[in-house]
Amino acid sequence: MTANVPFAMVPLPAGRSAKPRKTGLTMMMDWGLPLGRAEDYMGLLAPYVDLVKIVVGTARLYPEDYLVKKLAMYKSHDVTPFLGGQFSEYVFATQGWKAMPGFFAEAKRLGFDALEVSDNCVPLNDDERAKMIRMAIAEGLEVHGEVGSKVVNQTPQDLIDQTEVCFDAGCHIVLVEGAELVTNGKVNEAMMAALKGGLDLEHTLLELTGPWIKGVTLNDVFELKKFLLTEFGPDVNLANVQPDDVMETEAQRCGLSVIGPKTRAEAAE
């Protein structure tokens, strides 16, 4: 951070890394932002965003040239856009294995350098998960694995084992499904404790949940984020941050949000 910033007398925490960063990653969700609006967001927020997920199957609904421009815009801001895993789940469920090489090749042709392989709604066994990941890598894509389900609760060991399958198959990073981290909207602290001890946290992103999960409120999302930053530190890798929440998330990382400092300095004499 240069000296030409407002309130330069207020130091930012040494534990918060700056881009290009290897930890403390923030993944932002893009549910179909218009190009101009996305570019406006990046004009301010790019220093605090590392990855952008083009969510679910929304990529199918763009005009091709528009999507290509949007992906290029994100890359110009040193932000990696990637294709959300539920799109590949849909293709796999409806067209089977025969369609996957062409799907991955099309993603690469359009300008995606990375995509997600998940089984949120369409279960994959370990062999299928590894096969899917290797198939995407063979088309020249970086693969972000995702473990966990939106429909079936799994044990911490299930998730830990699935992350190992992803890494062994060649994944660069793995995301943990946010629905697995909460129970009835509240943080599942037992799950968190087990994952903290069993995951490679430098290469794992922990997802925030959202209103697509029944019963989850905005306060539940905030409390989950607060818990993750408190338990895992300011450089925890976070996923599923909404565009309007990126700046507040960075403020939380730096201790500048509504959660104030826990100590009070004595006033200078």
Image (cartoon, rainbow, N blue to C red):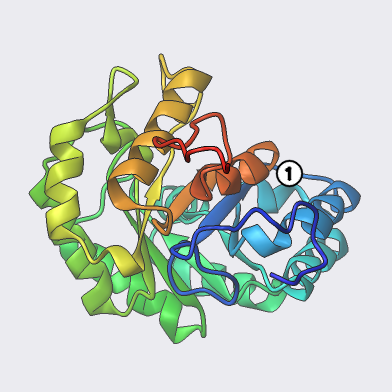
Spot the residue most to the top.
215
Say left or right for 75 vs 215: right
Taking the spot 28% from the left edge, 36% from the top edge, the residue there is: 181
Q: Is residue 72 above or below residue 83?
A: below
In the rendering, at what x and y percent does residue 247 appear?
66, 45
**Closer to us: 261 or 81:** 261
| Coordinates of residue 133 in the picture (x, y in percent) | 35, 72
The quadrant of the rendering that contains the C terminus is top right
In x, y percent, where is residue 203? Answer: 34, 69
- Depth check: give the residue in front, 54 or 43: 43
Q: Is residue 209 above or below residue 56?
A: above
Is 240 above or below relative to 220? below
Callout 1 environment at 10 Å: few (<14), some (14 to 19), or many (20+)?
A: some
Locate residue 100 relative to residue 179 in the image: left or right.
Answer: right
Q: Quadrant of residue 71?
A: bottom right
Question: Is 152 on the left or on the right of 69, as rendered?
Answer: left
Residue ID at (52%, 21%): 218
- Is residue 237 in view? yes
Which of the 4 image quadrants contains residue 124?
bottom left
The amino acid marked with disc number 1 is Gly
Mark 1 lies on residue:
32
Identified at 47% across, 50% down, the residue is 239
Q: Quadrant of the N terminus?
A: bottom right
